Amino acid sequence: MSNGLAYFKEVYGAVPGWVEKMHDYRPDALDHYTSLRSAIMEDGLLSRKEKDLLLVGINAARCYERSMLYHTKGAIDGGATIPELIEYLLVANRYGGLKSIKTGIQSVNYALSLKGLPKGPYFYNPEMNDVLHYFSSILEKEDATYVSNILKAPEELWNDLLLVRGVVSAKMKLLLMVGIHSTCLQGKDAGKWMERARSAEATEGELAEVGLICLLTAGIPAWFEASDSLFEGGS
């Protein structure tokens, strides 16, 4: 087995079809892609677990279930908890609305199955209230405070409360918003979220790592959009 195939078998537990086809047609391209992915996803200023969780949220926001589920497995294998996953997915809802959260429920159910826990119900047309109650029902009491506080608040405050610290820091939630807008090629908005993330003590290096994981999931244009708002020289 080539290094590229072995790498993805280790990451996903099996070699995905798209990896096999890249190997069949251009094994040299797979080797280069594997090296790039490995470098970007390794522990750095952001941990590999954090990067997988960010990619779960980014792909839920743009309703791209396949990549979201791959990174759900990566996050759970890296030690992510269900409460962490839920908070990233709720932030994704701030961008993509109910379509995003309906996609995100599949991530939660998959994560539950990976942990050997029963899956929740399938929601055909969920309202945010239904989703929040569902998430609250599967959280331990000490982890449910964030969701409970949103449920208790007027709906017009929910978007702001989604960014408040829970089991996930406010900084990571702001970095997720940077990643979502970069991936969706909305560079000016990504820049505005970068300013908010800097105010929450995000470093230029962390912002750059978010831009690089966006490259993995949406190609080099996502890096273009993120890099426009990074400071020169990493200062």
Image (cartoon, grey):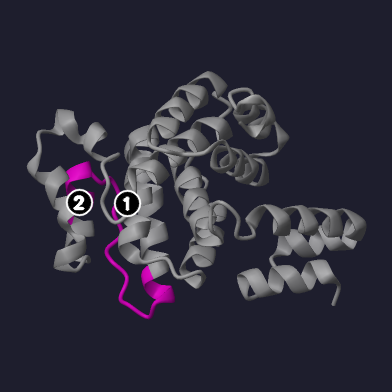
Residue pictured at 17% horizontal, 31% vertical: 157
Residue located farthest toward the top when viewing the structure as drawn: 188
Q: Where's residue 133, x and y in %? A: 16, 54
The secondary structure type at the circle numbered 2 is helix
Kindly indicate the quadrant of the structure image that contains residue 224: top right
Q: Where's residue 87, x and y in %? A: 32, 51
118 drawn magenta? yes
Seen in the image, is 127 located left or right of residue 190?
A: left
Kindly indicate the quadrant of the structure image that contains residue 176: top left
Dot 2 alpha-carbon crowd within 10 angstroms: few under 14, some 14 to 19, many 20 or more: some
The secondary structure type at the circle numbered 1 is helix
Quadrant of the drawing holding the C terminus: top right
Residue 101, label in figure: none
Question: What distance separates the C-alpha of mark 1 from that of mark 2?
Answer: 8 Å
**Which label's residue is closer to the chain start, 1 or 2?**
1
Q: Where's residue 59, x and y in %? A: 50, 46
Seen in the image, is 119 located left or right of residue 20?
A: left
Dot 1 alpha-carbon crowd within 10 angstroms: few under 14, some 14 to 19, many 20 or more: many
Identified by mark 2, the residue type is Tyr
Residue pictured at 44% horizontal, 35% vertical: 177
Kindly indicate the quadrant of the structure image that contains residue 22: bottom right
- Compared to residue 66, the image places residue 210 above or below, namely above
Identified by mark 1, the residue type is Glu
What residue is disc 1 on? Answer: 87
Quadrant of the drawing holding the N terminus: bottom right
What residue is disc 2 on? Answer: 146
Q: Nearer the viewer, residue 101 or 88?
A: 88
User: Which span of residues is magenta-colored?
Assistant: 112-133
Residue pictured at 18% horizontal, 59% vertical: 144
Cβ–Cβ under 8 Å for marks 1 and 2? yes
Seen in the image, is 86 located left or right of residue 5?
A: left
